[in-house]
Amino acid sequence: NAMRDLQADLRTLVVSDEDVIPVIMDEVLQSRLETMKDHDITALQSKATERNPEIMVLERQSQSDSLNLSWQESLAVPDLTVGASYDQRGGAFNDQINVGVSMPLPLWNRNRGNIELARATISQTLSQLSAKRAEVSNQLRSTLLQYTSQQAAYLAGQKLSKDLDTVFQGVLNNFIRRNIRSEEHTSELQSRQYL
């Protein structure tokens, strides 16, 4: 079932109605195995976290949340407004010059809710970022363990294949020299002995 599902995915990817059977040359496979023998887990983890798009999005979100906190804190400072006006004949005096200063009320605890929300958003984004980094690191470790076990199985399979070829050649040579007989011939000889 898994093979059928994978074949369906491959047919979809290459836009084909026929089954896709990948062909890998032995020298290409061997060169890949040689290049992947030595891997530095720390370097791979740093590269994986640098290039992971979800981590990059969370880092940008963290920067955006920090800017939002700065903006919300700047809104907490009361705005002092100074104004001046001139009135030639409309005020209480002729050529009246007015100067005004205004400040919004209340003066303290302004925008406190939005500041706390911005801080909570920052801590939430940072916890999501650390969780995503841990997830990527664990996936990388799991993949490397799976790779090394599959590489060991492949190398063991290659050794077994060589050993089986040697055994096959030995059996064939002994059969040609008549050191080994076929099962039919052996059972025929055994039946004659009992008669």
Image (cartoon, helix red, strand yellow):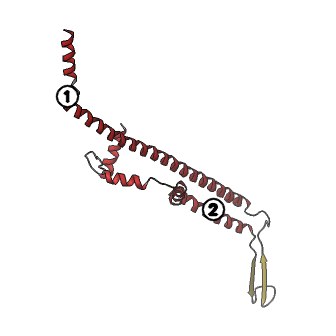
- The residue carrying pointer 1 sits among few (fewer than 14), some (14 to 19) or many (20 or more) residues within 10 Å by Cα, namely few
Q: Residue 92 lies in what quarter of the image?
A: bottom right
Q: For the residue marked with disc 1, what is the amino acid? A: Arg
Q: Residue 80 lies in what quarter of the image?
A: bottom right
- In the rendered image, the residue lying farthest to the top is 195
Q: Tell me the CA gap for discs 2 and 1.
A: 84 Å
Q: Residue 89 lies in what quarter of the image?
A: bottom right
State the quadrant of the C terminus: top left
Disc count in the image? 2
Give the percent coordinates (x, y) of residue 4: 33, 40
Q: Is mark 2 on a helix, strand or loop?
A: helix
Residue 178 badge:
1
Q: Is 90 in front, or is 39? A: 39
The tag earlier along the polypeptide, 2 or 1, is 2
Q: Mark 2 points at which residue?
A: 65
Q: Tell me whether the residue at label 2 lies in contact with that at label 1, contact meaning CB atoms closer than 8 angstroms.
A: no
